[in-house]
Image (cartoon, rainbow, N blue to C red):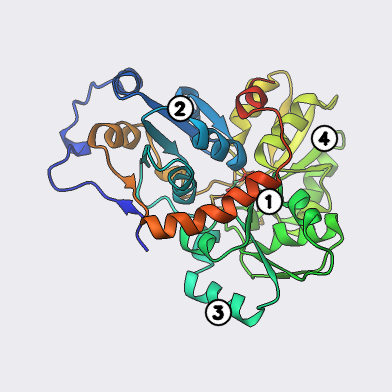
Amino acid sequence: METVVRPGADVITADQLDPYLDFETEIDRLRRENNAVILAHYYQDPDIQDLADFVGDSLDLSRTAATTDADVIVFCGVRFMGEVAKILNPARTVLLPDADAGCSLEESCPPDEFRAFREKHPDHIAVTYINCSAEVKALSDVIVTSANAETIVRQLPADKPILFAPDQHLGNFVARQAGRDLTFWPGSCIVHDQFSERELIKLQSQHPEADVIAHPECMESILKHADHVGSTRSIIQYARDSHKQEFIVATEQHIIHEMMKQAPQKSFIPAPGADGTCNCASCPFMAMNTLEKLYLCMVNNAPRIEIPEDLRILAKKPLDKMLEMTPPAASPAQAAAE
Ligand code: 13P
Ligand code: SF4
């Protein structure tokens, strides 16, 4: 189901823009005039991260979107993140710079196939990673992010079987950590699937002092070499707080921008792909958002997330369950400032 209202025919387009326009200044003006807040994920281009009001992982971004009193949430991330903001805070306008900024995990899990998967396992609890469509959320019992998946699975009744979708690598990691058998949906992220164990081992031999820090969307062959596995926020904090000076980073490359801000004296090496060079893993969906598109969505009030109310109510239930089952942490704003 299309949850994005695309710009109409009468909007301002990129070719009409003054070539001397200063996007940063104009975005700032629109932010003030429209009482807007700009939220950005750590995988966004540094220029977008730098002008956002808040940069975070999926969990912190969801919490921030749920509680903001700004009239407009401009979501610099991928579509499912914008949908979560709208589901949790429907009175706000939610803008997305590029309507096509999807996610390979979301694509791997079409709602009709997920419904059939559930029907095949009627006695299972459906634990679903937040990287999925609003329709898949509506068919789930509880949503998780990479930051809270393990703690939520640990709280589920021991005698109940569990389905985990759509990321099999995160599911596998959680199953090992929590000591639970999970039945997986066979999805994975095209970005985190790129890392090569053989090349990682070579890189480690060239940097024997470096810690490997990895996102749990990586394959087990990568995670088993990691000194720390966690959500984007968690691996940034680990790098900042560790006594180590050098880190091999197995996740999307733009996270290194925040790592360098929080620990400027340390060095960060992107994990290698199969060709042995730094492929500098880049999410093609996150990369669709640019400063120009950010400016245009604020001018045009589109692309804009709109979710039918019956679907929104169904999708909100497992998201509320997630927030209920997530231990109170430092507020996202505090966490970012730590
Ligand atoms: P985080 O929730 O850790 O920020 O991850 C989101 C994501 O899409 C990773 O690919
Ligand atoms: Fe989706 Fe992977 Fe991009 Fe994250 S990095 S948004 S999981 S495609």
Does mark 3 have its CB less than 8 Å from ligand 2? Answer: no
For mark 4, give the secondary structure: loop
Q: CA distance from mark 4 to mark 3?
A: 45 Å
Q: Are marks 4 and 3 in contact (CB under 8 Å)?
A: no
Which residue is denoted by mark 2 in the rendering? 47
Q: Say which label, 1 or 2, has the lower sequence index.
A: 2
Specify few, some or many for label 3: CA neighbours under 10 Å numbering under 14, 14-19, or 20 or more.
few
Q: Earlier in the sequence, mark 4 or mark 1?
A: 4
Residue type of the residue flagged with mark 4:
Ala
Nearest to N terminus: mark 3 or mark 2: 2
Q: Is residue 160 left or right of residue 315?
A: right
Q: Relative to residue 277, is residue 106 depicted above or below? A: below
Q: How many marks?
A: 4
Residue 276's label in the rendered image is 1
Q: Quadrant of residue 27?
A: top left
Relative height, residue 182 to residue 32 (above, below): below
Q: Amino acid at mark 3?
A: Ala
310 relative position to 331: left or right: left
Question: Residue under circle 4?
Answer: 210
